[in-house]
Amino acid sequence: MQREYRDRGLQIIGITYPPQTLAQVRRFVTKMGINYPIALGNKETKALFDDGDVLPITVIIDREGKVRGIVQGILYSEEFEEKIRPLLMSVTQPSAR
């Protein structure tokens, strides 16, 4: 999704949980070919958005920084189309004056 929609404003940021070492995260990122930033998280980081035990979670944050939704579990394409895609701006050329 990051590759396909980055030009329309999508920015994915991964946060590890449960806590991992930097070396573990780097190996995982390289092995999986992840193309977005990953931050090291902990219980307090997760608690900012969700207090449940379900992983992964997707926190949808709009351009103004407002949390627009949380998806517990895997984000399926139907949920992306419903909850995230409408928030993406189409790239437009600046108007000439």
Image (cartoon, rainbow, N blue to C red):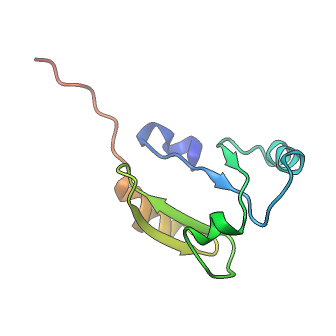
* Whole-percent x, y for residue 29 in the image: 79, 46
Q: Which of the 4 quarters of the picture holds residue 27?
A: top right
Residue at image location 67% in from the left, 70% down from the top? 56
Residue at coordinates 83% horizontally, 57% vertically from top-left?
A: 20
Residue in view at x 77 percent, y 43 percent: 33
The answer to whether residue 88 is above or below residue 77 is above
- Judging depth in this view, the residue of 4 and 71 nearest the camera is 71
Image height of 24 relative to 77, above or below: above
- Most extreme residue toward the top is 97
Q: Residue 32 in the image: x percent, y percent?
A: 80, 49
Which residue is outermost to the left? 97
Q: Residue furthest bottom?
A: 52
Up-down relation of residue 51 to residue 76 (above or below): below
Location of the C terminus (image quadrant): top left
Which quarter of the picture shows residue 58?
A: bottom right
Q: How many marks?
A: 0
Name the residue at 66% across, 43% down: 37
Q: Quadrant of residue 95?
A: top left
- Image position, residue 93 (x, y; %): 27, 27
Q: Nearer the viewer, residue 77 or 19?
A: 19
Q: Is residue 48 left or right of residue 53?
A: left
Q: Position of residue 84 (x, y in %)?
A: 43, 60
